[in-house]
Image (spheres, rainbow, N blue to C red):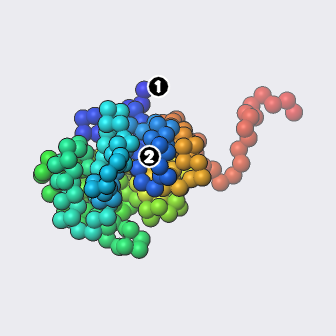
Amino acid sequence: MSDTWTLGGRTFGSRIIVGTGKYASLDQTRAALDASGAEMVTVALRRIDFSQPGPSLLDAIDRERYVLLPNTAGCYTAEDAVRVCRLARELGMDEFVKLEVIGDPKTLFPDNAATVEAARILVKDGFQVLPYCGDDLVTCKRLVDAGCLAVMPLAAPIGSGLGIRNPHNIRLIIENVSAPVIVDAGVGTASDAAVAMELGCAGVLMNTGIASATDPVLMAQAMREAVSAGRKAFLAGRMPRRSYATASSPLEGVIE
């Protein structure tokens, strides 16, 4: 079954986007990316020390195999986020960017207003923007109106592993915005990824859920399979929920 999706004129077969932070080594990073089946990976530019000798995180990413999605993690103003994206462009990276503007240092919740502001500037500047935002329908609509390729509402606080806290909000966003919805942040295990896909999300972005597992490579494989299973369940259409039991076997023709 062919079930591809498109972002910015590019077609993807995989619906999992993987982050590159928190792994024990570059070798583990490479192995986890491979096991995940991802075709797009994200990297936090502000956390790369380009002055250090030897291979960097960017060397672990095969640019022929993966679409690189530089992100603005660690930015607390729209101006800082725009500056980081422009730095990525100067470094020869793709026009795809993951936009993050943090509003609260404890919860790492996004500053939705600043995110919309930065998105408008970046889209006018020619970037293809995928913004991390709260699970707020109005914000998501504003980001789509600003020209973002997709919206990426959080499932739960970054790195928490709590899974989708507000599935109703995510479903409302899916039903009411004219762009792909990619759940970002809070996915802790395979069942969380499956739930996101069963709701109808176009994809799932995760980092800590894989990198902080006891066996990150095996968890990457589990996440890959969960995303695939959740997507198939969504396409298949689940049975209706009922308040009472119904017999699994038909009653017609039963011999008394």
Q: Quadrant of residue 117?
A: bottom left
Label 1: few (<14), some or many (≥20) within 10 Å? few
User: Which amino acid, mark 2?
Assistant: Leu
Q: Residue at x 37, y 57 (%)?
A: 153
Helix, strand or loop for disc 1: loop
Q: In this rendering, is residue 34 above or below 70?
A: above
Which residue is farthest front?
53
Q: Residue at x 73, y 33 (%)?
A: 250
Which of the marked residues, 1 or 2, is nearer the chain's N terminus? Answer: 1
Number of the label disc, if any, that sits on residue 26: 2
The quarter in which the C terminus is drawn is: top right
> Could you say which is closer to the camera, residue 194 or residue 90?
90
Q: In this rendering, is residue 100 above or below 4?
A: below
Q: In this rendering, is residue 148 above or below 62?
A: below
Q: Residue at x 58, y 43 (%)?
A: 218
User: Which amino acid, mark 1?
Assistant: Met
> Could you say which is closer to the camera, residue 224 or residue 3?
224
Question: Is residue 188 toward the left or the right of residue 154 in the image?
Answer: right
Separation (CA) of disc 1 from disc 2: 34 Å
Asked if the residue under mark 2 is in contact with the one under mark 1, i.e. CB atoms within 8 Å, the reply is no
Q: Nearer the viewer, mark 1 or mark 2?
A: 2
* Residue underneath mark 1: 1
Residue 216: tell me if it is visible. Answer: yes
Question: Is residue 114 toward the left or the right of residue 102 in the image?
Answer: left
Residue 168: tell me if it is visible. Answer: no
Q: Residue at x 32, y 51 (%)?
A: 53
x, y percent for residue 196: 48, 49
Question: Is residue 175 toward the left or the right of residue 80 in the image?
Answer: right
x, y percent for residue 97: 26, 49
Number of the label disc, if any, that sits on residue 58: none
Helix, strand or loop for disc 2: helix
